[in-house]
Structures are given as structure tokens and as C-alpha cells.
Amino acid sequence: MQSTPFYYRKRNQYLAVIFALALILLLIAEFSSFGVGAYYVFDKPISNVVAITSHNSTGTSLEITAVGLDNKSGRSIWIDPQISYDANGSAFVNASSGFLIGSTVSNSSGIISGSFPISATTLSRIESDGENVHTVWVIGTTQVHSQFSPVFKGTTADSRQNYSAATMGSGITFFITLITIPVPLNFSFGQLFLTLWTIYIILFAMAMNGPIRNMLGSIKEASTKGTQALFDNSMFATLIIFPVVVWVTVALSLLEQAGGVSTGSLPPADPLLQFVELSIAPLREELGFRVIPIGLAALLILFSRGRFRDGLLSLWHPSRYLKKDDTPAQYKRNLRTMFIMIGVSALLFGLAHVLLGAGWGPGKILSAAVAGIGLAGLYYLYGFPAAVLLHWSIDYFLSTYDLIPSLQNVGGLISLYTLGISVAGSIVLIVLLVRRLRNGPPGSIPANWSSGKI
């Protein structure tokens, strides 16, 4: 009698279900970061400057807490100053603009914390100046700049603005691979967050529901067929790949640094601005570095065959519409093209981190390119939602807890949990890869190939 293969033994299927439950815990942690972000964006100031207006029987005052300033340096507190920038990007404040509330000196730790009274006359002028949103600046000034008129004074590099959910933005930069395109848009940070989070929730729902089975169906299938069944669901596939990509790139960065190759880092920025950047990056970078090179190649292939509707839909899910109505031989030829475009996409993604001036060092090219392979592979196999959610998990989810000092310990525990998932996920991927290679060389058409499936 032929023995039952290891991967069909009952004990192994219990392990597949346990692994699926561990992934669901990771998914719950990801969802929790939405709540954390919402609370700290809309209810709790996290910026370098926190300004609160207090009204009581003695009058009105502006309570200021600012961090990250030069030690024991003089600062002026302003509301709605006019800030201009010269050709070198240096900032200058119009000495006759806005409202000067008071002056102070930072302590030995570069912190300002105090209450500054606002006179009734000044308060009346502020309330009647036609501005719906008022900004607070903690400004240190240096020389007078002769280029501007009236008199502008140069601000020190560590001058800080107060940001909130009501802070207005005037544009978003999009990518077409290495080409940047600024798009003028008027929005408040709060509006932008709500819009982006709505999009992400929709993408989560789509990933959890397919493309072959929903999450519950994949767990049921895994209980009898093993971990391979989890890859029938986009969300499970993303949750498996995400920790592997994170820890592989961390390992590569550590090896490069040990060899003297700098990976660099992003420059320090206001936490609320970082929230904005981390929230929008997954969408715009997946559009610019996955949909453009990979999806566009799939679109051109299908357009050349007169399949215009499938070509447009392939921008959303390349493998599904390339496979649809194709013979195995045609799909195999397409697969080679897609492998090339995945490589091109990953290389461009790695180069962009250095060439576009974000602050990364040359060592970042390799780790970003490796992450780009994971992102491109998910996009090709599972579509746009999976790629965006993988990128969102790397950027927003893990960084949420780092940006909030009181939650950094929680972030550390989550990072350790992802390390465990990455070890288990790597084992699963290696086993499935070995099993796939036994069925044929890379690029071969599996025996159960059929249109419309991954």
C-alpha cells in the first residue's frame, strides 16, 4: 500500500489551521493600527509643537509644548505668520505678518513648555482675519533677507510649525516610475486620512474575499489540503509574504552596514507629516512602480490581440486576464514577459529610493529592490489590492507604533511576532517551492492549469 504523503497527514493539516489562525491575529493587529492612527490624528496631538487655546475667567492663553529645538535658544511664538522660501529652500518669516504672541527660551533639552496670554484685542483680530484654520509656529530668527520686501527674517533650521487634522495641504506627488508628477489638490490632513483609510478598508474587504476563496473557505480547505490552500486567498497570501519581505530586507540592510555600505535613513520630520506620507505612499508607489511597468505590459499584450476590455482589467489583476482564454503555450510566453517586467519594476523601485532624493544611501537599492520583487509578485498573481496592502503593512502598520512613543513597546512585540510568522512563512514557501519544482521547471504550466485562476 502506498503511504500517505507527509503534507496530507492529519497532523500537518492541524498545523496549517494553526498557522492560519496566527495570520488572523496579525490581521487583527493591522486593523488595530487604523484605530491608533485615527485617535492620534484626530484626538491627540502628536506633532513636535502642541498648541492648545484655553479660555477662563482671567482671559485667553495659548499653551505651548514644543520639542526638538536647539538647547537654550530664543524662540518667538507666532500665529499665522507669512513664511516665504528663497531659491535655496531657506525659510523666512515676514516680521510684520501674523500675530506675535510672546517670546521664550528653550531648556537644556530643547523643549519649550509654557502658557502665553493672548490679549482681547489680539484675539479679536485673530478671529476676524478670515482664516478658518490657524497655524502656530515656534520660530527662531537669524538675519534679515534683503531679497524680500517688506522685511523678512530668516528662520533657524529647527523652527517648528504646529500640524493638526485641520492643517491644509495643497498637492500630492505621484510617480511614473522615476518621473515625479505633482498634482495640485486642496485638502486638510483629516480629509486625506479619511479618504485614504476608506480606500484601504475597501481593499482589505476585496482581498479577504478572493480571488479564489474567501478567508473562511481557505481555512476549511487548508484543514484537509494543507497550507497551500491558504494561497487561494489574497489576504492570507499577503499576510504570509509581508513578514518574510520585512525581515529579509532587514537582514540585507544589516549585512550591508556591516560591510560598510550605507543604507541611509529618512530625514526627521513632524510625526503628523510622517503619518500623511506613510498613508499615501502605498497607493501612489504601487500605481507608479507596479501598475505602470507590469500592468501596462499586460495591457499592451492583450490590446495586441484585440482584447481591449481584458487589457484594461489586467491593470487591476494581470495574471487573471492574461490567463483568461489563453492556451497554456500563450500563457507561458506571457509569463516570461511578466518575469522580465517584475525584474524591471523591482530595479526601478530600488533606484528610486536613492535617485529621487529621499535621503537613503546606496545600500537601500538592494533591500528596496528585494521588497519590490515581493510587491510585484503579489501584484501579478493577486492584483492591485494585495500589492497595496503589502506595501501598507510595511510602511504604515509597522511605523504607526514607532511614531507614538507610548506605544513603542507594543510595536516591539508586534515586530517580534512578525519575526515568528516570517520564519514559519519562509518554511511554508520553501516547501511549496520544492513541491512545485518537482512538478516541472520554473515557467512550466502546472497540470491543473485552467483559465481565470492563479
Image (tube, helix red, strand yellow):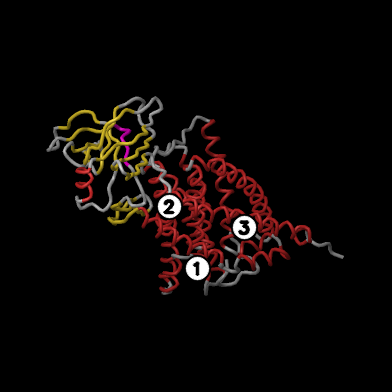
Residue at the spot of label 3: 24
Q: Main secondary structure of the magenta part?
A: loop
Q: Say which label, 2 or 1, has the lower sequence index.
A: 2
Q: Position of residue 125 (x, y in %)?
A: 19, 46
Residue 102 or 356: which is nearer the viewer?
Answer: 102
Q: Residues within 10 Å of mark 3 (few under 14, many from 20)?
A: some
Residue contact at pointers 1 and 3, CB within 8 angstroms: no
Magenta highlight range: 156-161
Q: CA distance from mark 2 to mark 3?
A: 22 Å
Q: Which residue is mark 1?
A: 322
Residue at point 59%, 72% (across, down): 450
Q: Nearer the viewer, mark 1 or mark 3?
A: 3
Q: Who is closer to the viewer here, 158 or 263?
A: 158
Q: Report the amino acid beneath label 2.
A: Ser
Residue 38, horizontal then vertical, whole percent: 45, 53
Q: Position of residue 198 (x, y in %)?
A: 44, 62
Q: CA distance from mark 1 to mark 3?
A: 31 Å
Give the residue drawn at x 20%, y 53%.
Answer: 130
Q: Secondary structure at mark 2?
A: helix
Q: Which residue is mark 2?
A: 279
Label located before the other in sequence (2 or 3): 3
Residue 70 among those drawn in magenta: no
The amino acid pointed to by label 3 is Ile
Position of the C terminus by quadrant:
bottom right
